[in-house]
Image (spheres, rainbow, N blue to C red):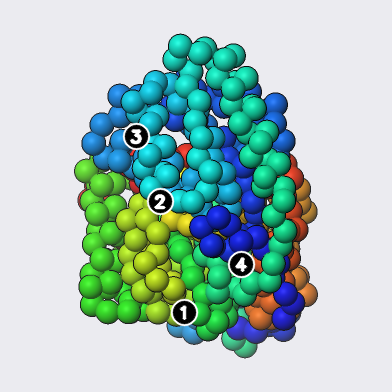
Amino acid sequence: MSELNAYLNPDGKAAPRNHNLILSLNSFCNTAAESIHRSVTPTVLITHPHGRNEIGINKERLLKSLIGNALNPNVFSVLVVGYENKSTSAFVNELRAKTKKPVESVLVLDNGTLGATREGAEIASRMSQINSEYSREKFSISDFIIGLKCGGSDATSGIVSNPAVGKTVDRIMNMKGTAIFSETTEIIGAEHILAKRAANNKVALDILEAAKRNEEMAMSLGVDLIGTNPVPDNIRGGISTIEEKSIAAIMKSGSGKINGVLDYAAMPPDRGLYFMDSPSAATEVVTAITAGGASIILFTTGSGNPVGSPIAPVIKITGNPYAAKKMREHIDVDISEVITEGKSLQVGSDKVYRILEKTISGRLTKSEILHHNEFAPIPVGL
Amino acid sequence: MNGEELKRSKIVLLSAGDNVAVALVPIQKGDILENSGKNIEARDDIDFGHKIALRDIKKDDNVIKYGEIIGVAKENIMAGSHVHVHNVKSLRADKHE
């Protein structure tokens, strides 16, 4: 096993990246935040179309998502771009109470977008220089929270990429590591398998309840899941029903004990494997699990999926030999030799683990290289 | 299933007892495929990754893949047929049409 070299962040957590984050609090602060991001390197950017007049669960989920992502181990400093003082100060104070990272803010009201950009760029420049003085140190795999996601699934997801990643996750759990998987709609039809792996009765019930809630939500909307989940590219790839997709999807979580069900964007209370109750679309899930502290994502795909994150490297793994060629600019780990050359799943899993180690230690993912920085703090949905 | 089997076969059975297998290459109608020592003739063209019925599946019978129920047959499906959204439906979030 090779060494893992990562950063120790201001909160004492291991981090594969040390980002200087520019975070917009609402839609019309995005322009100033983008301008600061373009002016100052290296910075990462969170923008989104929400933030004003949000109420109830929408407001709660948006804040959890933004706070959680700012607290992610990969973030070493935060510049909040807000509109007016009251809501911006409240956000900054909540964040400062939870972290030792530098957290600063600029306001668009009374300064204008250009004024906020100028002031923000100066603050961000200072932070970039401070962050550049960190150097990598040795860590073990159990120091990181690994996020798990599948997207653009097809028949190969259940035969190659998900079971191979499942073996990798089993290996990480044997080393006392931590991982989060999610996608509540994509446990419908497979929840009985997960419930059997629950650490106790409460966890089993929480898993079954989450699936039931999502199924009832679909039915109350009067929608047919087919065409929504599975999506058209899943169907093109040979997946006929949500049950078939789910049974394959949960394979990426391996075979180990499930310690608990996390609320949307919540952090795992302990080590081990956790399921997060969340909507299922790729960007939404990645946003939710990075809010829960995942600092690196293993992302399996059948047909290929370009999604990335501003916060965490997203490692794309495919077992589909066609996607490995057609979508090669997005694929980090091609394990299609399990099908084309008859290699074992263990060979595929070992390859995933090697790239995981390298990526934690600084190897860039295709999503990072291609500026795939999607972010979707979705309120509620399937 | 092991790697050598995957390499050799045009279709793969994911769990003993499944009534469908998965195409590992594009299959053409009339192709003769081997499964567990028995030959089966493809009745349809079947794309890479898509399912083929290994035996006759009656309307309303369960479709089994990975050793799990993935849905039910919407119509009688003959061995060798393409099994997909046109002849299988989910049992979940069912609107009871």
Numbered disc 2: secondary structure: helix
Report whether residue A255 is seen.
Answer: yes
Q: Amino acid at mark 4?
A: Ser
- Looking at the rendered image, the quarter that the N terminus of chain A falls into is bottom right
Numbered disc 4: secondary structure: helix
Q: Amino acid at mark 1?
A: Ser
Would you name the residue on which mark 2 appears? A98
The answer to whether residue A128 is left or right of residue A254 is right
Q: Reading the chain from its start, which is encountered first: label 4 or label 2?
A: 2
Q: Are marks 4 and 2 on the same chain?
A: yes
Numbered disc 1: secondary structure: loop
Q: Are marks 4 and 1 on the same chain?
A: yes
Q: Amino acid at mark 2?
A: Lys
Residue shown at 70% from the left, 26% from the top: A39
Rendered location of residue A234, percent (x, y) = 53, 52
Rendered location of residue A147, percent (x, y) = 52, 61
Residue shown at 54% from the left, 62% from the top: A13
The numbered mark 3 sits on a residue in which chain? A
Q: Are marks 3 and 1 on the same chain?
A: yes
Q: Nearer the viewer, mark 2 or mark 1?
A: 2
Would you name the residue on which mark 3 appears? A90
Q: Nearer the viewer, mark 4 or mark 3?
A: 3
Would you name the residue on which mark 4 appears? A161
Report whether residue A326 is seen.
Answer: no
How far is disc 2 from disc 1 in space, using C-alphas?
A: 34 Å
Q: Amino acid at mark 3?
A: Ala
Would you name the residue on which mark 1 appears? A255
Quarter of the rendering containing residue B49? bottom right
